[in-house]
């Protein structure tokens, strides 16, 4: 878009764009929702009474459904080449007072599983990017995890098979009603910022959140809360 602008208007516009640029570094969710753009001015100096020609372009961020598809099992398929970052937000898996470890993996195009996390709740750093990968158009990404039962590993639940033990959700999605934690105000502290008062997922427009139940409890049980492991997947 082009226009003629008075020098004072140029200053105001540059200030506005400067504020926008500064806001891009405040966090991954905001980075996904703030418009980006370019601005060109045809003159570096403008005399009083003259005007400059401005050329600018604003790009508005795409919603998650514009850039990826999530099939019924939870497999994520890209619609364009994207940069994917994966973080573990929290782990809440234990037997009584004993913390038990979780083992989490990701896989590309149905290939071998690659470990992205192993540990208990206190070992989680939600700011740490555990996977930083460029995923090409039409490639598929899956995630899986398993919990340690005390003497052996419990079942490996993943997005290549449809199961209620793992679910992938986008912004505005309703948290699963069969998970009692979301109906009893007992959501774990690390998950609270990502679920609003209506029980809906509150994340960036180009983020996905993945919830796991690592036990063998049946849906509807008080032990089945779908927050044993929480993973955040962000696309750029």
Image (cartoon, rainbow, N blue to C red):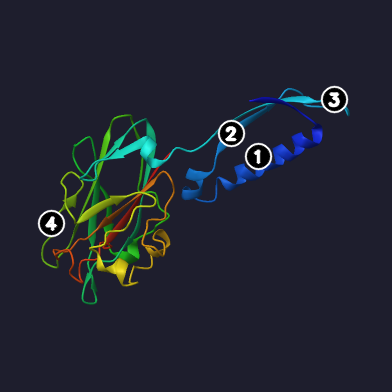
Q: Tell me whether circle 4 and circle 3 mark residues in contact (CB < 8 Å).
A: no
Find disc 2 in the rendering and name its residue.
37
User: Going from the N terminus, do you reach mark 4 or mark 1 first?
Assistant: 1
Q: Residue 50's mark?
A: 3
Cβ–Cβ under 8 Å for marks 2 and 1 = yes
2 or 4: tag closer to the N-terminus: 2
Q: Quadrant of residue 18?
A: top right
Q: Which residue is mark 4?
A: 155
Distance of mark 2 from mark 1, alpha carbons?
A: 8 Å
SS at mark 4 in the image: loop
Say which residue label 1 marks.
17
**The N terminus lies in quadrant:** top right
- Nearer the viewer's eye, disc 4 or disc 1? 1
Spatial CA distance of label 2 from label 3 is 25 Å
**Nearer mark to the viewer, of 2 and 4:** 2
- Label 2 secondary element: strand
Question: Callout 4: 10 Å neighbours few (<14), some, many (20+)?
Answer: some
> Looking at the image, which residue sits at the far bottom?
97
Q: Which of the 4 image quarters holds residue 66?
A: top left
Q: Nearer the viewer, mark 4 or mark 3?
A: 3
Question: In this orientation, which residue lies closer to the viewer: 155 or 204?
Answer: 204
């Amino acid at each position: 878009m082009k226009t003629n602008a008075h020098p004072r208007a140029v200053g105001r516009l540059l200030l506005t764009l400067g504020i926008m640029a500064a806001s891009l570094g405040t966090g991954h969710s905001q980075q996904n929702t703030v418009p980006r753009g370019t601005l060109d001015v045809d003159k570096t100096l403008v005399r009083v009474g003259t005007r400059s020609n401005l050329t600018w372009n604003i790009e508005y961020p795409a919603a998650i459904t514009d850039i990826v598809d999530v099939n019924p099992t939870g497999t994520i398929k890209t619609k364009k080449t994207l940069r994917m970052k994966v973080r573990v937000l929290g782990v809440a898996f234990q037997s009584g007072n004993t913390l038990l470890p979780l083992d989490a993996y990701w896989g590309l195009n149905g290939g071998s599983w690659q470990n992205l996390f192993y540990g208990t709740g206190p070992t989680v750093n939600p700011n740490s990017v555990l996977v930083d990968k460029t995923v090409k158009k039409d490639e598929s990404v899956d995630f899986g995890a398993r919990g340690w039962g005390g003497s052996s590993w419990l079942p490996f639940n993943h997005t290549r098979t449809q199961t209620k033990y793992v679910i992938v959700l986008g912004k505005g999605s309703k948290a699963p009603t069969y998970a009692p934690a979301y109906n009893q105000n007992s959501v774990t502290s690390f998950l609270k910022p990502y679920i609003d008062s209506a029980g809906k997922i509150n994340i960036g427009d180009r983020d996905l959140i993945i919830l796991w139940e690592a036990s063998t409890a049946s849906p509807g049980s008080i032990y089945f809360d779908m927050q044993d492991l929480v993973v955040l997947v962000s696309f750029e």
